[in-house]
Amino acid sequence: MNIFGVGLPEVTVILILALLIFGPKKLPELGKQLGKTLKSLKKASNEFQNEIDQVINEPEKENLPKSPQKKFIKDLDQVTKESEEKDFLESDNNDK
């Protein structure tokens, strides 16, 4: 067993020292606090990583037009309308 580069004998010595220093009544409270601290650090780390991933994967919205498809359709409609008007006028002139 190897936790953070510390083996089982070292962990045992650390736990015995903690037991001697803090006593059996304080040790569970300290373990609980340590667990809460590690949990909150992990949560903050995950949130930070998610924000970084969102920024990296987010397309550059500032450089892209808002809706290129709508602009194309609007331009196409304008050209079609002008073409129809031109055809109508030409057919009207040919009828005379």
Image (cartoon, helix red, strand yellow):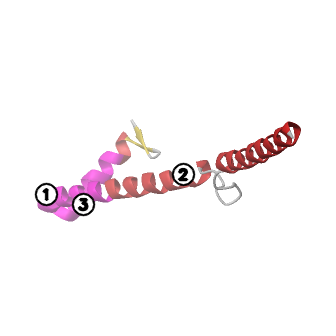
Can you tell which of label 2 and label 3 is closer to the viewer?
2
The residue under label 2 is 54
Q: Amino acid at mark 1?
A: Pro
**Picture quadrant of residue 7:** top left
Can you tell which of label 1 and label 2 is closer to the viewer?
2
Which secondary structure is most common in the magenta stretch?
helix
Residue drawn at 50 percent across, 52 percent down: 49
Q: For marks 3 and 1, give the CA distance.
A: 15 Å
Dot 2 or dot 3: first in sequence order is: 3
Quadrant containing the C terminus is top right
Residue drawn at 78 percent across, 42 percent down: 88
Residue drawn at 22 percent across, 60 percent down: 30
Task: Check disc 2: other Cα within 10 Å, few if <14, some if 14-19, many if 20+.
Answer: few
Q: Residue furthest front?
A: 96
The residue under label 1 is 24
| Front in this rendered view, residue 30 or 88 | 88
